[in-house]
Amino acid sequence: MKKKFQEYKGLESYLSLRMLVQIIFCLVIVSTGIKFYFFVSQLETGIIPDFERPPGVEAFLPISALVSLKHLLLTGTINSVHPSALVLFLIICLTAFIVKKGFCSWVCPLGLLSDCLAKLHFNIFKKNVGLPVPVDLLLRSIKYVLAGFFIWNIFYKMPLNSIEQFIQSPYNRFADIKMLKFFINISNTSLIVILVLIFLSFIIPYFWCRYLCPYGAILGILSFFSIGKIKRNPSYCIDCGICEKKCPGLIKIRQKELIHSSECTTCMRCIKHCPEKRSIGFFIFSDKIRVEQLTIALVMILIFVVGISIAKISGNWRNKISKTQYLGYIFQNNMSWNKNGRIDPEMMEKMIKIMKNIQAQKVQLDSQRKDPEP
Ligand code: SF4
Ligand code: SF4
């Protein structure tokens, strides 16, 4: 009894560890977003920021990453427009070959939000409300259809010249700014859609992840080739069913020895709650090496740190779009905000201020070049 209690206490800390890792990644993502917001805000006032644009913001450009992947496969080069989008996409795919869809439950901020909503759901309803199996199966196909749509159009229908045109198009070059604007000036329709999705993820836990996320669909497919898998040992299993009750992927764990399911996010809840610790675990290379949560946490962090470091050293982390080019885009974009073909006087005043600032900065740079400090 005492031993079991100790095991439970030890395992309890595992959950905290996963949440801790989720929170760390979430903080990194939020700070990246805030820095990018200040970067764009300064440009909008005509000031060239004295800090660099955070490349990590490209993690939110998955279509650009897929196009870049095809470009890489066809040309052998990483394009310089959004290199970190591709780097982060490749890193995330790499995690799937080791810890299945571990990215979803260890890194993704939407996974963290879904976890919180699922906890709230359980605290209120005291049970997990699931959908009937046929409906569940039908809805689960949506994310594969969405992922298939993008993969089909990019990898099958776009020839190399279209890929290169897309990469260099203003739409792609400044897609990060468009994305920021989308969230800052969010339309009522988009806000309602987001709130409905949050509500659905509260009523039906992991609704977004389970049915709609195309990123999760891609990782789910790659996870079939993962060297790591949850393994149940029937010799020790007492068939209590606790693991299945706790599994967010609604996987029928007791019907299997090796969990191949594309819904397994390596959240380790089945292991945490199992009263017979030897009966279930996460193993790499079939049943050769048992891996605990601390190792998974370290592997996850290490993959990102090493991957990003390699990208930085090889010059494939920061893009080659200059701050002046960003400023030019914002300038042009603001100029197009007119009504009935006339420029808003307030906007015109702002633009004149921006032009004056650019001019002043240019003069300052020119004089620095002419009179270099001794
Ligand atoms: S509870 Fe176990 S089987 Fe279910 S998703 Fe988590 S790790 Fe995978
Ligand atoms: S919780 Fe553990 S003992 Fe119970 S059914 Fe699952 S694997 Fe078997």
Image (cartoon, rainbow, N blue to C red):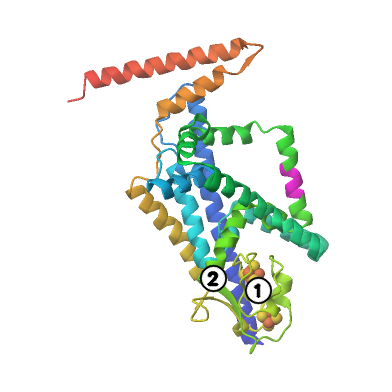
To which quarter of the image does residue 316 belong? top left
Callout 2: helix, strand or loop? helix
What x and y, as percent, mark residue 338? 62, 15
Q: What's the CA distance linking mark 2 and mark 1? A: 12 Å
* Mark 2 Cα-neighbour bin, 10 Å: few <14, some 14–19, many ≥20: many
**Marking on residue 293:** 2
The one of 302 and 226 positioned closer to us in this rendering: 226
Please name the predominant secondary structure of the magenta segment in the image: helix
Callout 1: helix, strand or loop? helix
In the picture, which quadrant includes the N terminus?
bottom right
- Is residue 31 among what the camera can see? yes
Q: Is residue 316 magenta?
A: no
In the rendered structure, the answer to whether residue 305 lies left or right of residue 192 reads: left
Asked if the residue under mark 1 is in contact with the one under mark 2, i.e. CB atoms within 8 Å, the reply is: no
Q: Which residue is mark 1?
A: 270
| Residue at 35% in and 18% down | 362
Identify which amino acid the numbered label 1 is placed on.
Cys
Is residue 308 positioned above or below 83 on the image?
A: below
Specify which label sits upstream in the sequence, 2 or 1.
Answer: 1
